[in-house]
Amino acid sequence: MPSFGSEETVKELKRALSNPNVQADRLRYKNYITKVIRYMTQGLDVSALFMDMVKASATVDIVQKKLVYLYMCTYASDKPDLALLAINTLRKDCADPNPMVRGLALRNMCNFRMPGMTEYIEQPIVAGLRDKASYVRRVAVLGCAKMHSLQPNTEIDGIIVNELYALLRDPDPVVVVNCLRALEEILKDEGGVVINKPIAHHLLNRMNDLDSWAQSEVLTFLLRYRPRSDDELFNVLSLLDAFLQSAHAHVAVATLRLFLHLASAHPAVQADALLRTSAPLLATCGAASRELRFAGLCHVQQVMRSQPGLFGTHYKRFFCGYSEPTYIKFRKMEILVELVNDENVALVLEELRSYCTDVSPELAQAAIAAIAVIQTFRDLVWFCPQSTAAVCQTVEACVDSPQDSEICFVEIKKIRPFVSEQASQLLVQTLVLSRLDYCNALLAGLPASSIKPLQLIQNAAAILIFNKPKRMHVTPLFIDLHCLPIAARIKFKEMKDCLFYLIFNLILVNYVTLSSPNDTEEEISLSLGPPLSHETFEKMWLDLEILHRQTLGSPRPRTAPDTLQAALQLVKIQTLAFTPRDTVPWKAYIYTRSTGTLILAELLQGDPQAPGSDESLVVSVKQQPVNQHAIRGFASILKSVLQTLNVDSS
C-alpha cells in the first residue's frame, strides 16, 4: 500500500528525471535513479516512472544500467504494454560492443516474468552461446535452462542441447560447469546429462581449473560413469588421487564417495582411500561452523560403517564441548559408542558418565543409553536365542564390579523376556548385593522400624526393573531428593553415582514399608490383572459393602498425578480415576488383585464421618470374595507408598 505522500514523491521524481538540466548532469541524474530504486525497495509504487527509467538505460555507465535493469525486471509484469519497449531496449543492448553490457542485458532479459518471453529471448541466447566473451557465454548457458523452465511442457530443442554439449569443452571452466547444470535441468525427464568416456576424461583433466564448489559438483556428475576396464579405472583413480586430501572438506568427501563407488571391486583400494581421507574429515569435525562440523560427523559415521576402527585412536576428537549444540552432542555420543575398544573403554565411559548430569533431560538419557552396553547382550539374545545361557553368565560376571553394575542396571530389563525367572532374579539380586555399601548408606537414614530385611529390597528391585509398566517414563537423574529423609538426602549428595541413586531412590519411594521387624504376618502378592472398565467398577462398587475403612495418617500426595499413578502401578495398584489435584475434597478410585481376590478402594481427603477432621487420606476398601488378610495387606502397602511419597514434602 503506498505510504502517505507517495504520489507527491513520484511526481517529484518524474519531474526530475524528465528535466533536461538534470539529464545533462550525469551525477545528479544517477542520484535520482538511485532514489527511485531506494523507494522501490522500500515498497513505494514507482511504476509510473517506467518510461523515464527505460530512457535512462541509454548510458555507458554500467552501474546506472544495472539499476535500470533491476527496475525494468521488477515492473515488467505490471506494465505489459510498456514491457515490449523494455525488451527491445535489452535486445539492442545484447549487441553492445561492451561484453559486460551484453551479458547484463541478456541476464536481465531472461529474468522477465512474462508470458511469451521465449520468442524474444531465444535468438539472443543462441547468439550468446557463440559469443567471444566468456562472461556472455556463462549467462547464455544458464539462460537456456531459464528458457526451458518458462515452457517446461514443450519439446526439447535439440539444437540448444547440442550447443550445450559442445560447450562442455569450452576453455572457460565456469562455462563448463554451467553447461552441466543447464543440461541437468533441461534433460531431467530423460535422466539428466549423459557422462560418456570422452566427457568423463575431459572433466577429470579440467578439475584443477575449477573452484572448490565446481569440483564437488563435477565429482558428483562423474558418479554416472563406469570405467570399462581396470586399466582405465586406475587411470581415473590416479587423476582423483590428489583430491582425496583437498583442503576443502566437501571436495575431499565428494572424491572419497567417487573413489568408493569406482573401486567397489577393490576393497584394498577403498581402505586406502578411507585412510587418506581421515585427516580432512577429522579437521571438518572441529570446524568453527556448526553446520560444517555436523556434516563432518555425519560423514564420519558413514565411513565407520566400512572401516569401524579407522578413527579409534582419535576418539578424544569426539568428546562433547560444553557450548556445543545438542544435535552435535547426540551425534558425537553415537560415534563414541562405536569407537569403544579395550584401550579406551575406561576414558570413554568416564566421559559418557559426565554427560549423565547434563541440563538437558534428553541428552542425559541418551548418555545413559550410550553407557548401557548391555543393549548388545539384549540384541544378541534376540537374534541368537541359543546364546541366552552364555549372555546370562557374562552379565553375572560383569556385576561383580561396582562400575559394571551401574551399566547393567539401566538396560538389563530388556533381557527379561528371553531368560528364565530364576536367572533374572539371580542377576538383580547380585546387582543389589554388589552395592551393599550404598544400601547401608541409604538405610542408615531411615528408622529401623521402617525397614524390612534385605530380601525385601532384592525382591523390590526385581519387581521394579522387570515388571515396570511399559508406559511409565522415568527421568533417571532428576528425581527430587525431597522424597527421602534428611539424613539419607545428605548421604545422597555426597555420592557421585547417579544411576545407582535412581534405582534405590525408586525402591525406597515405592517399597519400603512401615511394618515392624517383629511382624511375621505373611506377605501378600498384588497383581494388576486384566483392566476394569469404569462401568464395571461402578456397578461392583455400588453392589458391594465397605469391609474396611482406615485413616492412613498421610495427606494427599502433592506430586503430579502421573507420578502418583506410576508409584501405585509399581506396587501393582491401578488408578481408575481421580479428581483434579486442586479439588477439595480430593478423591481417587483404585483397584488391584490378590490371589484371585478383587480389591476395590476409594481414597478420600478427610474422614466423611468426622466433619472438621484434618486432611489425612481415608481409604475405604471393598472386596470380592472377602479376604481380611488381603485387605489389611493392601491397606498397609498403600499407606507405605503414600507416606513415603510425602516424606519431608515441605
Image (tube, rainbow, N blue to C red):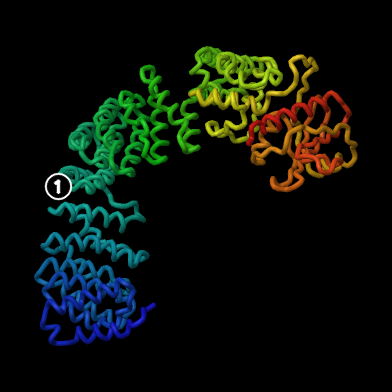
Q: Note whether 474 is above or below 94 in the view shown.
A: above
Locate the N terminus and report the quarter of the image it occupies.
bottom left
Is residue 429 shown left or right of residue 209?
right
Is residue 259 something one can see in this rendering? no
Residue picked out by circle 1: 209
Is residue 490 something one can see in this rendering? yes
Pick the residue in front: 353 or 204.
Answer: 353
Amino acid carrying label 1: it is Asp
Looking at this view, name the residue that lies furthest to the front: 612
Q: Note whether 398 is above or below 562 in the view shown.
A: above
Instruction: Give coordinates of residue 526: x percent, y percent.
Output: 76, 26
Instruction: Give coordinates of residue 112: x percent, y percent.
Output: 29, 71
How many other residues sit within 10 Å of disc 1, few (<14), some (14-19) or many (≥20)?
some
Residue 187 occupies quadrant: bottom left
Is residue 8 shown left or right of residue 376?
left
Q: Note whether 581 is above or below 354 in the view shown.
A: below
Residue 568 occupies quadrant: top right
Instruction: Give coordinates of residue 439: x percent, y percent.
Output: 59, 18
Pick the residue in front: 272 or 33.
Answer: 33
Total numbered badges shown on the rendered structure: 1
Instruction: Give coordinates of residue 363: x percent, y percent.
Output: 46, 36
Query: What residue is drawn where x is 82% and y is 25%?
Result: 630
Locate the C terminus and report the quarter of the image it occupies.
top right
Query: What residue is drawn where x is 67% and y is 28%?
Result: 510
Query: What residue is drawn where x is 21% and y is 72%?
Result: 67
Q: Note whether 427 is above or below 184 in the view shown.
A: above
Pick the residue in front: 245 or 372.
Answer: 372
Q: Secondary structure under badge 1?
A: helix
Pick the residue in front: 327 or 302.
Answer: 327
